[in-house]
Image (cartoon, helix red, strand yellow):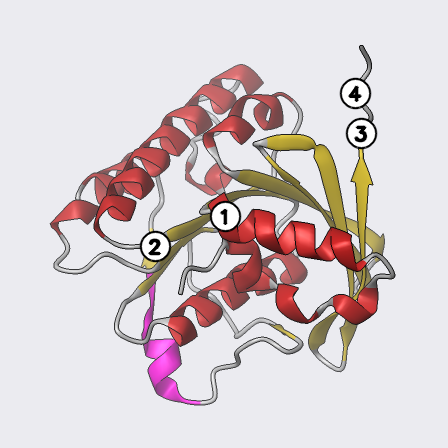
Amino acid sequence: MEYSVLNLMFPIQSLEKLTDKKDELCRLGEQEMNFSKSLLFFGENSIFKISLLFQSCLSSANVDQTREVIYIRREDLKSIPLFVHNMPKPTNDKLLKQIKFKYFQTSEQLIEYLAEMHLNSKAPSHIVIEDLIDFIDIQKHEQELDCVRQNLLISSHIKNVLDYLNTISNCTCIVGSRQKGEEENRLKYLFDSYCTINTIDKDILYEIVYKNSQNENLEYTLKFENRDSDLCIYHVSQKEKKLCF
């Protein structure tokens, strides 16, 4: 069974009770199952963002327990993040052992690793890169445009690797970035979909605004809260931009 990146973070198929417009939710589910393999995730590296990224790894490992999941970040994860309600949890060590953490300090190290990924005996089922900005030498790329170009270079490598891996077996990918603005406009079309996490009430309420790159007229908002160390979605809505002729 194929899973989209959104399905790996949220229980899309069980959200009917959160909206009065069931057709909108069906539309989101169908759209996601059709063609969303890669997601660009904008937002600060809060515990909530990291929790959603980690949840996607757990979900992918749970779906296919024969393949590894790759989580790339700059330094060790100090503790296990929060979990999403009604999504897989690490009930045994086997699930956690499937998630392989890779730590890099520079964009060159990351690109070299991506370039050699095709040499692995088995393709991973899912890849997470927590934050592109973590691998960029800010002193070397002082100008914002230089950072954008470096992010474009890394993202192009990611897209090439993902395209190749999907010729062998299904593979999904989520790439985080805490930088927006010019970067958002340039990077988003390298990915199937993109979203931004916004704070409603710090440490309690958050929302994700999601768009698919193939149809940016449709915007989905998923609101969730921290409830007893579980992230619980409590509202889903759709907004459609009207085209002017």
What secondary structure is marked by label 4? loop
Q: Which mark is residue 241?
A: 3
Mark 2 nearby-residue class (10 Å; few <14, some 14–19, many ≥20): some
User: Which circle's residue, 4 or 2, is located before the other in the chain?
Assistant: 2
Which residue is under mark 4?
Answer: 243
Is residue 140 in view? Answer: no
228 to the left or right of 180:
right
Given the image, on which type of amino acid does mark 3 rest? Lys
Pointer 1 and pointer 4: residues touching (CB < 8 Å)?
Answer: no
- Residue extending farthest to the top is 245
- Placement of 59 over or under 90, stated as above or below: above
The residues bearing labels 4 and 2 have C-alpha atoms spaced at a distance of 45 Å
Residue 164 image point, x, y percent: 24, 40
Q: Quadrant of the N terminus?
A: bottom left
Mark 4 nearby-residue class (10 Å; few <14, some 14–19, many ≥20): few
Residue found 17% across the figure and 46% down from its top: 118
Which residue is under mark 1?
Answer: 34
Q: Which mark is residue 52?
A: none
Q: Which mark is residue 103?
A: 2
Given the image, on which type of amino acid does mark 1 rest? Asn
Given the image, on which type of amino acid does mark 2 rest? Tyr
- Placement of 48 over or under 17, stated as above or below: above
207 to the left or right of 173:
right
Residue 100 is covered by the magenta coloring: yes
